[in-house]
Image (cartoon, rainbow, N blue to C red):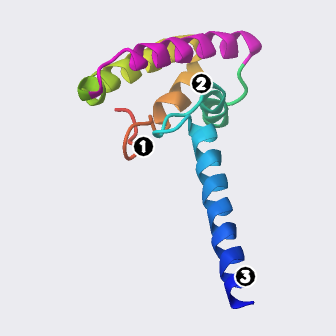
């Protein structure tokens, strides 16, 4: 009976670990990157409602940025990644209205630590 309880406990912990890992990877596409949909939600929460046209344009920017990042060699990702994020943020900012741009500038801009953009 004791072995059965231990087995059930181990299986339960295994399932919980799998579910939480799978959920984190789905939400962030692994390695800390947000999906374009999650990023748009984050931007919308910070700047207010986005139009359908803004969402379409921003999604295209984010998808291009993700493809560009995937093409960067692992050893260059930190430096080149910062450049790519800055470029995509500049493109996203251009899609936003003046009021939205002000709010976008104030939001934390990814990377380690989520530092605000200066």
Q: Locate residue 96, reporting x and y percent.
A: 59, 16
Left or right? Give the position of 47 relative to 90.
right
Highlighted range, magenta: 51-74
Q: Is residue 57 above or below residue 115?
A: above
Question: Residue at the location (44% across, 34% down)?
Answer: 109
Please, what secondary structure does the residue beneath circle 3 have?
A: helix
Q: Locate residue 32, reporting x and y percent.
A: 47, 40
Name the one closer to the observer, 68 or 97: 68
Q: CA distance from mark 3 to mark 1?
A: 45 Å
Name the one closer to the observer, 92 or 6: 6
Left or right? Give the position of 109 relative to 81.
right
State the residue position of label 1: 114
Name the dominant secondary structure of the magenta segment: helix
Q: CA distance from mark 3 to mark 2?
A: 58 Å
Question: Residue at the location (71% across, 83% down)?
Answer: 5
Question: Residue at the location (62% across, 16% down)?
Answer: 59
Q: Quadrant of the C terminus?
A: top left
Q: How many marks?
A: 3
Number of other residues with Cα within 10 Å of mark 2, as a class: few under 14, some 14 to 19, many 20 or more: some
Q: CA distance from mark 2 to mark 1?
A: 19 Å
State the residue position of label 2: 100
Q: Which mark is residue 4?
A: 3
Number of other residues with Cα within 10 Å of mark 3, as a class: few under 14, some 14 to 19, many 20 or more: few
Q: Which mark is residue 1?
A: none
């Amino acid at each position: 009976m004791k072995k059965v309880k231990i087995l059930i406990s181990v299986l339960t912990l295994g399932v919980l670990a799998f579910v939480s890992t799978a959920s984190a990877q789905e939400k962030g596409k692994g390695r800390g990157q947000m999906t374009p949909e999650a990023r748009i939600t984050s931007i919308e929460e910070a700047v207010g409602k986005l139009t359908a046209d803004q969402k379409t344009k921003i999604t295209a920017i984010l998808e291009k940025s993700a493809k560009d990042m995937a093409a960067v060699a692992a050893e260059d990702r930190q430096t080149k990644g910062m450049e790519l994020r800055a470029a995509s943020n500049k493109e996203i900012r251009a899609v936003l209205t003046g009021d939205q741009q002000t709010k976008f500038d104030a939001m934390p801009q990814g990377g380690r630590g989520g530092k605000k953009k200066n």
